[in-house]
Each structure stands twice: as structure tokens, then as C-alpha cells.
Amino acid sequence: MSTTALLFQFSYAGPWGAELSANAVELAKDIAGETGLISKVWIENQDLEKAGGLYFFTDEEAAGRYRVKHEARLESMGVRDVDVAIYSVNEPLSRLTGVLGSGACPA
């Protein structure tokens, strides 16, 4: 098993910040229960009208399963402009820079 990163980015008109946090609690709880998920970082850029997430999974298989599920969820929400990619995490370098084991992506 090696840590796998999954990056979703898409056009988004809001809500942002605290309002998004209040509106997305149930979604966050659902994502938190995803098999193989280590953590998710919610990303947003109001100036670019983009949002998304950086997910860390225990392995590529779990990331792939979630990718299919989340692409379908986004499509059902009317989100069409989705960029998604799966990356291998370089664990030794990530530990040196404080990602692995820091809580963002624990080993």
C-alpha cells in the first residue's frame, strides 16, 4: 500500500468560506466515512471561482473508487467542468516537508 492523492477542481460560484462550511456538513460527514480515506483538504478560490478538494487515500484502488463516486455526485449537482487527477505520494519527501505524519496525511 502506498498513499495516493486525488485532486478535484471545478468551476464554482459559491457559497464560500463559513457559508460553505455550514452548508456542506452532511457532505463532509459522508466523505469522512469513505473506505480508504485518510483525509481531505477542502480548497476554494473565490477570485477564480474554483473549488475542489485534495484527498489522501491509503491506496490507488480506494482513490479510484471514490473518483467514480464523486464524479457522479458532482454531475448530479450540475457540475460539469471537473478536472480530476490521481497522483502517487512520495512519502519520504512528504515526511521531510511535514505532510505525512502531521495530520494532513498521516502515514
Image (spheres, rainbow, N blue to C red):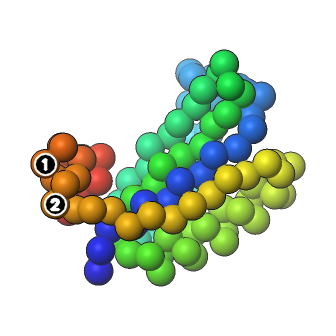
The answer to whether residue 28 is visible is no
- Decide which of 93, 33 is in the foreground and name it: 93
The answer to whether 77 is drawn above or below residue 60 in the figure is above
Residue in view at x 63 percent, y 37 percent? 51
Q: Find disc 2 in the rendering and name its residue.
A: 92
Report the amino acid beneath label 2: Pro
54 left or right of 50 in image: left
Q: Find disc 1 in the rendering and name its residue.
A: 96
Q: Position of residue 101 (x, y in %)?
A: 17, 52
Q: Position of residue 93 (x, y in %)?
A: 19, 54
The answer to whether residue 6 is visible is yes
Q: Quadrant of residue 22?
A: top right
Q: Tags 1 and 2 in contact by the CB under 8 Å rule?
A: yes
Residue in view at x 29 percent, y 46 percent? 104
Quadrant position of the N terminus in the picture: bottom left
Q: Secondary structure at mark 1?
A: helix
In this view, the residue farthest toward the left is 96
Residue in view at x 81 percent, y 57 percent? 75
The answer to whether 87 is drawn above or below residue 18 in the figure is below
Neighbourhood count class around disc 2 (C-alpha, 10 Å): few under 14, some 14–19, many 20 upward: few
Q: Secondary structure at mark 2?
A: helix
Residue in view at x 83 percent, y 51 percent? 80
Per the rendering, the mark at residue 76 is none
Q: Quadrant of residue 56?
A: bottom left
52 left or right of 92 in image: right
Report the amino acid beneath label 1: Leu
107 left or right of 78 in image: left
Q: Position of residue 65 (x, y in %)?
A: 57, 76
Q: CA gap, disc 1 to disc 2?
A: 7 Å
- Decide which of 53, 26 is in the foreground and name it: 53
